[in-house]
């Protein structure tokens, strides 16, 4: 059995897989006819996008990708600007304990709502789900611009996070819909290439608004820019959608159901029970990793323990529901057990776990230990973004020419990440040359760009077109879980090691100031470079970072096993999408 056939040996009954019925090669009328018919067994949203790609022209396809590139540009600039402005927004109001709690909630909610969006894209259609995200993101920006207290800003952050995450997720689904599996990695890398520019622009844009019109006008400006840039892409897809519908490429649905029948139908199509169990389970599981520091007893807090228990319980109930009771499964159970899909999810969790282990407190380390200013430290940190974009484009091109993705991760991506983080253990210490740290940063970024592209291709190669949106959402969910755990591990190590090492290294006369030194980077920077206190702080930083990097390096043993689980699928010749695609 070939890898491609083996990858799809088990599938949901009744689902016709594109790989099970390949389109014959050659210019025969039968082949052209099959090419122009959307998969009748797919959900309406998938049928709709397949019909769009059949009827649109090459010019429309190119225009769509220009619009996608512009949308990525605006979204990347918005994300960086919002992160830079948030401290100034909260300082404009009286500090309130609600702020960190709701910031956590918005992050968690933004991480799980893509599961719901995936079903909207599949059941109602890609343009419709995309429009919902535009509306939510714009509403959040308007609320942020108009807020007059910290509670209103916190609520606006939830809308903004859900809409912004949804827009970027929708774009990744669009790229998957409009590119062949062979070219998908390259097209995704090119579409996200604006990050090469926006990572340097967010700071100057934020500074310009703060020195001029103010942060409210910044959010107000983006409330105009976001719909102005994103709506044309919605219009293009909707125009071609109705063009395909008029051409009879998919059946007109006369809906004569009652309101209750419609509710029952869409509840079934959405797998509402499964979606609720999974979303609630993941949200409850993630919250303790972010909220435990706000509890007096930390991990021993009854609230934290209850959230963890109920989160795990709901996730288990989701698996039971999908296996035995769901009339329409959120994810086909065979895919949940597919080793390529599971390996891709585990690799995503590993990548984000490792990222937060090496990146947490990295900017502070560069300022305190290497004596870089804020701008210089940001340049070193942003080297990761630049390297990731460049390497992802190169890897996408290699997949296009070779059709292979597993060897790139197995022999290049994972080993390079282990090498970069392992070397960082040695070089992220006092008196180390900053050039060595940048070198390690480049290794890690090239590894991340490789793994991100290969991981997405792996999970998409293991399924048919109609499951792409859901699998991408699940992949993001595992990354969210891995990131939450990684951030918790990094924070726990930092909070345990740094104060102990400060107590060990600080001169006796400075021990009364230990808590203020530990808690405030401005206090740490106030001591002159070369002074006994600054040297003690630098050594304490180095020890804490060493343990964090050891944890981040060790977890790649899981990443290596995850890649080994993949089938070595050759993507050249696999036909997932229909019509005029890249």
Image: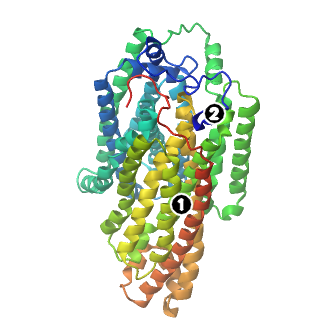
* Viewer-nearest residue: 159 or 42: 42
The mark found on residue 331 in the picture is: 2
Q: Position of residue 337 (x, y in %)?
A: 68, 40
Mark 1 / mark 2, whichever is N-terminal = 2
Q: Position of residue 565 (x, y in %)?
A: 63, 48
Is residue 480 visible in the rendered structure shown here?
A: no
Q: Position of residue 416 (x, y in %)?
A: 48, 62
Q: Is residue 557 above or below residue 252?
A: below
Q: Is residue 580 above or below residue 173?
A: above
Q: Which residue is pictured at 47% across the width and 29% down the height?
A: 129
Q: Is residue 470 above or below residue 51?
A: below
Is residue 514 visible in the rendered structure shown here?
A: yes
Q: Which residue is pictured at 61% across the width and 33% down the height?
A: 5
Say which quarter of the image contains residue 21: top right
Q: Residues within 10 Å of mark 2 (few under 14, many from 20)?
A: some
Q: Is residue 388 left or right of residue 302?
A: left
Read off the residue under disc 1: 354
User: Judging from the image, what secondary structure is the residue with disc 1 in?
Assistant: helix
User: Judging from the image, what secondary structure is the residue with disc 2 in?
Assistant: loop
Distance (Cα) linking label 1 and label 2: 27 Å
Q: Which residue is pictured at 51% across the width and 51% down the height?
A: 407
Q: Quadrant of the C terminus?
A: top left
Q: Is residue 536 left or right of residue 292?
A: left
């Amino acid at each position: 059995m070939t890898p491609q056939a083996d990858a799809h040996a088990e599938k949901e009954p009744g689902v016709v897989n594109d790989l099970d019925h390949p389109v014959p090669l050659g210019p025969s009328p039968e082949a052209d006819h099959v090419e122009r018919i959307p998969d009748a067994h797919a959900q309406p949203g998938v049928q709709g996008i397949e019909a769009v790609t059949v009827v649109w022209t090459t010019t429309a396809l190119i225009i769509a990708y220009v619009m996608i590139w512009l949308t990525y540009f605006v979204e990347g600039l918005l994300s960086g600007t919002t992160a830079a402005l948030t401290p100034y927004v909260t300082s404009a109001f009286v500090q309130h304990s609600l702020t960190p709690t709701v910031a956590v909630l918005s992050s968690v909610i933004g991480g799980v709502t893509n599961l719901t969006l995936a079903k909207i894209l599949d059941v109602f259609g890609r343009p419709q789900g995309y429009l919902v995200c535009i509306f939510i993101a714009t509403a959040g920006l308007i609320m942020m611009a108009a807020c007059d207290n910290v509670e209103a800003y916190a609520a606006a952050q939830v809308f903004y996070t859900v809409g912004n995450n949804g827009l970027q997720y929708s774009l990744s689904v669009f790229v998957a819909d409009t590119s062949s599996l062979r070219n998908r990695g390259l097209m995704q890398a090119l579409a996200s290439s604006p990050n090469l520019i926006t990572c340097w622009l967010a700071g100057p844009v934020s500074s310009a608004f703060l020195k001029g019109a103010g942060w409210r006008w910044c959010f107000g400006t983006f409330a105009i820019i976001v719909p102005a840039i994103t709506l044309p892409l919605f219009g293009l897809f909707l125009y071609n959608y109705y063009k395909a519908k008029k051409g009879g490429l998919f059946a007109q649905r006369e809906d004569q159901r009652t309101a209750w029948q419609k509710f029952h139908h869409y509840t079934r199509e959405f797998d509402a029970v499964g979606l609720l169990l999974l979303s609630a389970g993941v949200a409850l599981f993630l919250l303790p990793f972010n909220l435990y520091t706000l509890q007096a007893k930390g991990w021993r807090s009854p609230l934290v323990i209850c959230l963890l228990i109920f989160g795990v319980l709901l996730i288990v109930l989701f698996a039971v529901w999908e296996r035995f009771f769901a009339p329409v499964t959120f994810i086909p159970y065979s895919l949940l057990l597919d080793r390529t899909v599971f390996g891709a999810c585990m690799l995503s969790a590993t990548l984000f776990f490792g990222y937060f282990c090496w990146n947490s407190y990295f900017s502070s380390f560069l300022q305190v230990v290497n004596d870089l200013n804020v701008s210089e430290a940001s340049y070193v940190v942003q080297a990761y973004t630049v390297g990731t974009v460049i390497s992802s484009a190169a890897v996408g091109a290699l997949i296009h020419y070779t059709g292979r993705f597993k060897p790139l991760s197995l022999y290049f991506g994972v080993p390079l990440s282990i090498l970069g983080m392992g070397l960082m253990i040695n070089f992220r210490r006092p008196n180390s040359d900053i050039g060595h740290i940048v070198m390690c940063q480049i290794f890690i970024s090239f590894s991340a760009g490789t793994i991100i592209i290969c991981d997405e291709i792996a999970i998409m190669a293991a399924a048919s077109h109609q499951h792409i949106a859901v699998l991408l959402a699940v992949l993001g969910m595992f990354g969210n879980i891995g990131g939450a755990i990684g951030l918790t591990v990094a924070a726990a190590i930092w909070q345990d090691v740094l104060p102990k090492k400060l107590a060990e290294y600080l001169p006796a006369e400075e021990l009364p100031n230990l808590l203020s030194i530990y808690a405030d980077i401005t206090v740490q920077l106030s001591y002159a470079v070369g002074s006994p206190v600054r040297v003690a702080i630098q050594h304490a930083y180095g020890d804490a970072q060493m343990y964090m990097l050891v944890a981040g390096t060790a977890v790649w043993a899981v990443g290596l096993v995850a890649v080994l689980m993949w089938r070595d699928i050759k993507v050249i010749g696999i036909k997932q999408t229909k019509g005029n695609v890249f």
